[in-house]
Image (spheres, helix red, strand yellow):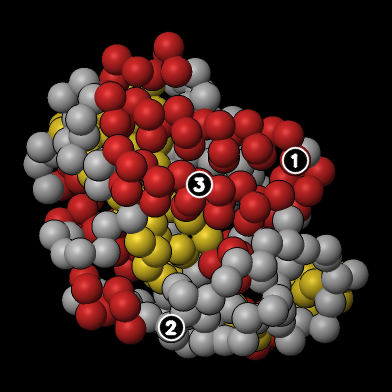
Amino acid sequence: MKSIVTGGSGFIGSHIVDKLIELGHEVIVIDNESAIVHDNFYYNEMAHYHNVDIADYTGIRSLFEGVDYVFHLAAESRIQPTIDNPLLCFNTNIYGTGVVLQCAREAKCKKFIFSSTSSAYGLTNQPPLEETMREDCLNPYSVAKVAGEKMCKMYNDLFGLKTIILRYFNVYGRREPLKGPYAPVVGLFLRQKRNGEALTIIGDGLQSRDFTHVDDVVEANVRAMNYDGVFHGSIFNVGTGRSHSVLKLAQMISDTVCFIPQRQGEARQTLAKTNKIYTEFNWKPNKTIEDYIREQLNTK
């Protein structure tokens, strides 16, 4: 088997690269390493890396020849920076996704697996959040990701490129971004704890999130690759079905906290309904945020 992972030097992508190598795949990584939240990018010596932008059709098209599976993770992936620069977000997350889809179609790849986001559900939907609910996009990031979802469905239905859309819920784990104020909250809190700083809680801290371990996300991608059911072109939630407030998360880590102003464009609560992915993929999460925090605090 031969696979492409876009964004394969980043947090989730690098874990998928490692898993595919473990499964015996030849792996090609496309990543321009532009993500500002990473202190480090990650490499597997058995994979083949290409530092090129996904929006560069000429630069990436030849890489898709003979490829079986495409895992598309490359994106402008933080909400607040996309509010600051919507055009960069749209160029990468909409146009770039279209380029990768078209390359996969032309190369007759077997399947295209798209990493999307629970932020598509916004504020109007009441948790638990289900794939059939309408989108409520609050920011350029969610708008662009939902556009990518719709392109995946169109390429599936019109062009016959089998696609699967995975909506991730607040992924955490090893290699998570730690740099700057917009790093994901689990990594940010752990970094602040290690540095002896107060944990910065946005707003009142009662906003809650469905925290999902990266290993479980990788397993969802593998099961999507192997899936042979009727729901191609369809959305699957990847979450735990459990939610924790940001304040509770902070209290697991430190007694020293401070509160900073609420941000625009973020949902109050995320909580996945996971019946569909369990029924179709026989997937369920195996890791908990409590165990991960405990492990991290006990690691010197």
Q: What residue do we see at 30% from left, 74% from top?
A: 277
Task: Compute the Cα span from label 3 to label 2.
Answer: 22 Å
The answer to whether residue 234 is left or right of residue 271 is left
Q: Earlier in the sequence, mark 1 or mark 2?
A: 1
Residue 38: x and y in percent read 58, 42
Mark 2 is on which residue type? Lys
Which residue position is annotated with label 3? 148
Q: Is residue 47 visible?
A: no
Q: Earlier in the sequence, mark 3 or mark 2?
A: 3
Residue 65: image quadrant is top left
Q: What residue do we see at 21% from left, 71% from top?
A: 281
For label 2, the crowd category at 10 Å Cα-Cα, with few meaning under 14, some 14 to 19 and many 20 or more, is: many
Closer to viewer: mark 3 or mark 1: 3
Circle count? 3
User: Above or below — where is 182 with respect to 215?
Assistant: above
Residue 117: x and y in percent read 52, 60
Which residue position is annotated with label 2? 273
The answer to whether residue 145 is left or right of residue 31 is right
Give the SS element for disc 3.
Answer: helix
Which residue position is annotated with label 1? 86
